[in-house]
Amino acid sequence: MRNIRPTESFFSLIFVLGMFVLAGAQLPLPETELVRLRHDWAMRFLEPGPHMELAKYFRANGNPIQAFYILENARRHRFETKVFDDAFLLHFGGFKPLDNSKAEEEKYLRLRKTAPDNVGVIIHLVDIYVSRNDFASAEPLFKLALEKDPENFTSVGALEEIYRRQNTPEKAKQILSAFESKYPTAAGSYGMRINRLLDSNPAGAKKMIAEALKKYPDDGTFWFYLAVLTDREKKINEAEGHFVKAAELAKKSAEIQARTASFFRVEKHDNETALKYYLNTYFLDPHAHFNGFAEAKVWNLSYDNSKAFVEKLIAGGKKAEQLIEDPNPIIAVTALSKIADNWDSSKTNIFIRMMRHDEVLVRWSAMRTLTEKEGRKLDTRVKDLLKDSDLRVRGLAAYMAVRLWKEDSFPEIRKMLREEAQLLRFDAVSALLMEGGHEGKKIVSEHKPKEPSEYLRKLIDASLTKIRREFRYTRLQPERF
């Protein structure tokens, strides 16, 4: 077993420096605020900020799984990694993207001259140098920060991380050994000694944990170590209490949240509670990986839990129509699928209502099912949906119109290409490329020079290039019978 390092994270060295702070809980927002956030999301769909704000709303109001799906849609399908990560740090951590320019460096060098003892200024300079992989400049500043705040183990851990990145393990050992020798009763020193004993001397580790907890009763790391040991002893109920306490006290430790989730999944077979802690992990670090990626665990557990939940309730006499309003969007989309299996036109209004859901998967599923099941019987409804006050619904109606009406839809879709709302232009382009045939692609190509969003212009370029390649490949293939 590798050493347990509850402060370790793979998102950024910012985490190691202890600078990533989860945004505080917010008071419930009025429903009008949700309407505003949805509208802003549609107006600025091609920018990361509105995705973050909408996700924050759902998390603050008790629906973290919906927040997760909003963020994952943005992370997987909309924005480059750096764009997403910078926005996540800003909106969920309260940190602006690090400016590591020469001008910023010179600004903080000047600040150092006027405030030489300001550890915050020193650490900011360290951040700049680390972000450039300029460890030679970062190292002496870290040492200076330690001199100013000698018991700060966070700085020690970060300096050790730099030495490891430089492939100088002896220096890493030396800095840790020096800290432990000088500050034997510091929390960090206890942690290092306990780590060394966990595998070789569990009884000794337990004794030292008890000693550490007398001095630091609210340090979640020591409760975590205790949880690990009692779990190994198969004292599952006792371990559960320790894991829960550790996770409560160490809300900012992605590893402790993930290991608590794993305990509930593997030892307690309690997937609902495991999902809660995996979500905590994800909101600390969307790229967190501890025996698997947190986001993958959330996806899988949410799907499995939702499918089992729907099946159980339906077997018990519930109707799928009673489940579509569930806060978990996977339950909603599963229920919609059940309703679609026994389709008749009386279900149309249910699916139109679900086109207003906050999860894109639910909205898309509702729109596609309606279009496939009802076809041209929807013409009047589609005309109304194209004028709907909900921009998300208008965007979905574009796909319906182009698929059902083909070239007869083009005048309306051309108008949509001139809308201010980024979502409407995105959906108009996508509908034309997906369902508009050769003429639809021609309209998109003509629109590209006039498109104000650089993001959407690049997307159009990439899509048209891919279509041309596929067309050429198909033409080169021998005719098949």
Image (spheres, rainbow, N blue to C red):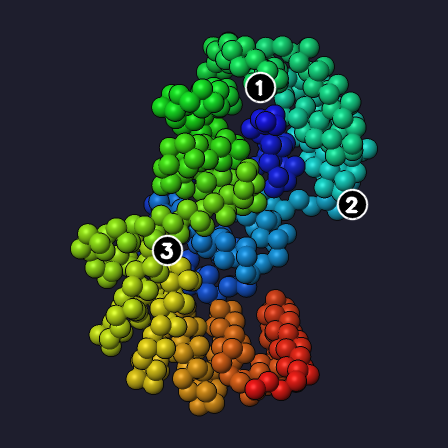
The disc, 3 or 2, on the residue closer to the chain's N-terminal end is: 2
Q: Name the residue under label 2.
A: 102
The kind of secondary structure element at disc 1 is helix
Quarter of the image for residue 1 reads top right
Give the number of the disc on residue 199. Answer: 1
Q: Residue furthest right?
A: 136
Q: Mark 3 points at which residue?
A: 330
The answer to whether mark 3 and mark 1 are in CB contact below 8 A is: no
Quarter of the image for residue 123 reads top right
Q: In this view, does 337 lie to the left or right of 40?
A: left
Residue 291 picture location, percent across and down: 54, 38
The mark closer to the camera, 3 or 1, is 1
Instruction: Determine the CA span between mark 3 and mark 1.
Output: 41 Å
Q: Residue furthest bottom?
A: 408
Question: How many other residues sit within 10 Å of disc 2, few (<14), some (14-19) or many (≥20)?
Answer: few
Q: Is residue 59 left or right of residue 293?
A: left
Q: Nearer the viewer, residue 140 or 16?
A: 16
Residue at the image point whose x is 38% and y is 49% from the top:
304
Q: In this view, does 68 lie above or below 333?
A: above
The mark closer to the camera, 3 or 2, is 3
Residue 28 picture location, percent across and down: 34, 45
What's the residue type where badge 2 is placed?
A: Lys
